Image: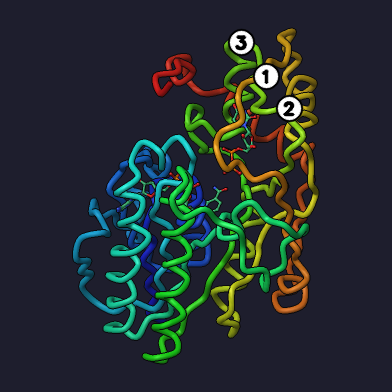
Amino acid sequence: MERKRVLITGAAGFLGSHLCDRFIKEDYHVIAMDNLITGDLQNIEHLFSLENFEFCHHDVSKYVYVPGKLDYILHFASPASPIDYLKIPIQTLKVGSLGTHNLLGLAKNKNARMIIASTSEVYGDPSVNPQPEEYWGNVNPVGPRGVYDEAKRFQEAMTMAYHTFHGLETRIVRIFNTYGPRMRLNDGRVLPAFIGQALRGEDLTVFGDGSQTRSFCYVDDLVEGIYRLLLSDYSQPVNIGNPDEITIGQFAEEIIKLTGTTQKVIYKELPTDDPKQRRPDITKARAILDWEPKVNRADGLKITYEYFKNLPAEALVNKEH
Ligand code: NAD
Ligand code: UDP
């Protein structure tokens, strides 16, 4: 039987590369697209020799063309860490808006089903906890995070419009903080930041007083949820994340224990509009996808720490701050 063909954008990034692995494992033909602005080919180089894998270096904010049939499009291209999207704010807005429009057009041409990587950031600094999909959010459009949050909100609106007005098969996953191997050690997100600091023998930088919360999901759980959502017939947004909520202060303590570092926590200014709490309500994912996370934080952190520990020494040099 002919293989199903899937286009994955942002394929050289953290999540995109794990999605490539999953679709290769399921025997799809994978077309991986990326402009490498925050990604790294090393994340997918183990797939290059496969006959059912191809890489296309392309900026999806420009017209996207893919020859042949396409069954699915997974649009995961976008800077995702606060330091990345603050460094490249216009590209972030463009990939969420123009990039999404280009890919929806491609999906319509090919009669392909498309899933977009939305985010818990559409809820902004939420006034309800946990956040259900029905919550409309509390986002500052002109604050520093607005370039990411509003791009993602527009992306959802545009995707829903293609679904409603063109009858396109679409899926929207709202991803909550996810971690695992292949995160960039220096991307500024809290987990690589803390582990990088521990490995370099630096103090761990907690922003604010550390009372803000996040809920961390291990990457394999997320990928399973995305896979199930794509194959489901549900076109409204679905939260995928791990509801095990923790304060950033407690999280720093967990990393100190895990790594055995003798360094301490130091406090730095809380970034503008940093959400105070974040925890997914996963009632829908449970009911519709029969999905819930399986990997607890202690196990996920151990695997992730091993990955970072085994990186070559030069990966530890922090060139990004
Ligand atoms: P990442 O930075 O590791 O990967 C993003 C990839 O997209 C990179 O390889 C980058 O080079 C590529 N890219 C960016 N702009 C592009 C463009 N214009 N054209 C082609 N490629 C482009 O980030 P990630 O953590 O893997 O995030 C992937 C997706 O998931 C993003 O859309 C992000 O918004 C979303 N998301 C991630 C998380 C998380 O916790 N990791 C949470 C919510 C949402
Ligand atoms: N954070 C921190 N120290 C760091 C990096 C981040 O205390 O070195 C905090 C940050 O202010 C936020 C939380 O950790 O409250 C998660 O930050 P991250 O950038 O990982 O994700 P996001 O804010 O997008 O959820």
Going from N to C along the chain, the mark reached first, 1 or 2, is: 2
Residue visible at 59% across and 54% down?
Answer: 124
Q: Position of residue 188 (x, y in %)?
A: 51, 31
Quadrant including the N terminus: bottom left
Residue visible at 76% across and 28% down?
Answer: 249
Amino acid carrying label 2: it is Asp
Marks 3 and 2 sit apart, C-alpha to C-alpha, by 19 Å
Query: Looking at the picture, does residue 161 appear above or below residue 165?
Result: above
Q: Say which of 242 and 70 sits in front.
A: 242
Going from N to C along the chain, the mark reached first, 3 or 1, is: 3
Marks 3 and 1 sit apart, C-alpha to C-alpha, by 13 Å
Quadrant including the C terminus: top left
Find residue 300 and report its image quarter: top right
Judge from the rendering whether residue 150 lies leftward or rightward of residue 238; answer left or right: left
Query: Looking at the picture, does residue 139 appear above or below residue 163?
Result: above
Q: Secondary structure at mark 3?
A: loop
Q: Position of residue 253 (x, y in %)?
A: 79, 24
Q: Are marks 1 and 2 in contact (CB under 8 Å)?
A: yes
Q: Say which of 314 and 82 sits in front.
A: 82
Marks 1 and 2 sit apart, C-alpha to C-alpha, by 7 Å
Residue 221 is labelled as: none
Residue visible at 68% across and 35% down?
Answer: 303
Residue 267 is labelled as: 1
Q: Secondary structure at mark 1?
A: strand
Distance from mark 1 CB to nearest ligand 2 atom below 8 Å: no
Amino acid carrying label 1: it is Tyr
Residue tagged 3: 202
Q: Residues within 10 Å of mark 3 (few under 14, many from 20)?
A: some
Residue tagged 2: 209
Callout in the foreground (3, 2): 2
Find residue 192 and report its image quarter: top right
